[in-house]
């Protein structure tokens, strides 16, 4: 059966991959974004209903993170609009170990819609498509929480899981936790990348306050600085939040992507080549 599916954040890390996966399966996919037709913007609730019209399923990615102020209100407004427009099901991308994100999960679970929750650990792609790319290019990765052990998860794995649960109703009402196959410290991550890229990378442990000051000096907005401070302190600071899950294997029938494999497939894209970056 083919579905009409709205992918919110359809140009983002997981969203564009979900769009590709659903298109390959032959579904009618619409990417929800500011530049979409019709436009979708989280801060403008009036864009919700037009984007949802004619859809029967939706993938929900809240930008920048479900932990930020205003997320709960936006998720509630979206689920209400989805119910009114007659959607059958939604899949919410959530954060592993985030209390604020869990509050948004409850809103979705109590919305009256069929749903699946996908909780993700930190993305591998933070080092190639996100906030930490500049560190890799500079050769110095200065990050706090040196003792944190993180089961980094690959965005390809997340997208494949989301694509599966969006169209497979046997996952309705379930919470799927997606992580990589092992826990790694930032130093282990940097050492793995240094070997894979063939360039000397140095991990420099710093305090959270030093990290925040660095972001402030770079001219980043206060909301962005707050979010990363929260993610480091509240998520990485709690060992219970960093357990390895086997849900990727349960859903996809294969092991989750190891960080070494992520490095190997990313090197060939050239994203870490200094001459390309310059």
Image (cartoon, grey):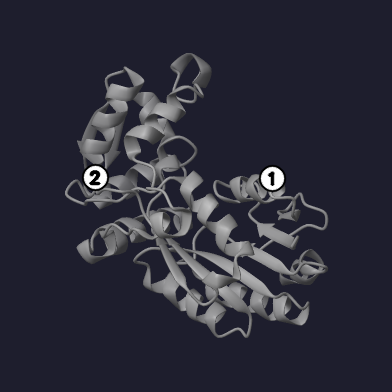
User: Disc 1 to disc 2, how far (Cα)?
Assistant: 33 Å
Q: Residue furthest top?
A: 275
Q: Dot 1: what SS?
A: helix
- For residue 187, above or below residue 25: above
- For residue 260, above or below residue 4: above
> Total of numbered circles in the picture?
2
Q: Which mark is residue 184?
A: 2
- 217 or 10, which lies in front? 10
Q: Say which of marks 1 and 2 sits in front.
A: 1
Q: Residue 84, percent across and down?
A: 76, 82
Q: In which quarter of the image is residue 6?
A: bottom right
Q: Quadrant of residue 229?
A: bottom left
- 150 or 36, which lies in front? 150
Q: Residue 232, percent across and down?
A: 30, 56
Q: Residue furthest left?
A: 147
- 169 or 79, which lies in front? 169
Q: Are marks 1 and 2 in contact (CB under 8 Å)?
A: no
Q: Which residue is drawn at 45% across and 34% down?
A: 128
Q: Which residue is drawn at 45% across and 41% down?
A: 125
Circle 1 packing at 10 Å, graded few (<14), some (14-19), many (20+), is: few
Circle 2 packing at 10 Å, graded few (<14), some (14-19), many (20+), is: some
Asked if residue 185 shows in the view, the reply is yes
Side of 124 where 155 appears, left or right: right
Q: Residue 154, percent across and down?
A: 43, 45
Q: In which quarter of the image is residue 261?
A: top left
Q: Dot 2: what SS?
A: loop
Asked if residue 44 shows in the view, the reply is no
Q: Residue 24 carries which label?
A: 1
């Amino acid at each position: 059966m083919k579905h009409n599916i709205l992918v919110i954040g359809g140009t983002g890390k997981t969203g564009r991959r979900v769009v590709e996966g659903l298109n390959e399966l032959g579904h009618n996919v619409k990417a929800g974004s500011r530049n979409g037709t019709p436009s979708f913007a989280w801060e403008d609730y009036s864009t919700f209903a037009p984007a949802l019209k004619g859809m029967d399923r939706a993938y929900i990615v809240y930008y920048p993170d479900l932990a930020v102020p205003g997320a709960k209100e936006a998720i509630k407004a979206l689920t209400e609009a989805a119910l009114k427009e007659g959607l059958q099901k939604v899949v919410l991308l959530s954060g592993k170990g985030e209390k604020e994100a869990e509050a948004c999960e409850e809103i979705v679970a109590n919305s009256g819609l069929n749903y699946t929750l996908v909780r993700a650990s930190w993305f591998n792609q933070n080092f190639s498509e996100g906030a930490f790319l500049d560190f890799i290019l500079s050769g110095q990765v200065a990050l706090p929480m040196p003792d944190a052990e993180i089961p980094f998860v690959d965005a390809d794995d997340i997208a494949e899981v989301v694509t599966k649960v969006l169209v497979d109703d046997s996952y309705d009402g379930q919470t799927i936790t997606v992580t990589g196959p092992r826990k790694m410290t930032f130093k282990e991550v940097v050492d793995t990348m240094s070997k894979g890229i063939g360039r000397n990378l140095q991990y420099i442990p710093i305090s959270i306050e030093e990290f925040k000051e660095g972001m402030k000096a770079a001219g980043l907005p206060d909301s962005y600085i707050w979010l990363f401070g929260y993610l480091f302190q509240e998520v990485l600071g709690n060992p219970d939040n960093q357990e390895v899950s086997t849900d990727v294997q349960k859903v996809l029938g294969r092991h989750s992507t190891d960080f070494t494999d992520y490095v190997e497939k990313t090197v060939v894209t050239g994203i870490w080549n200094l001459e390309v970056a310059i």
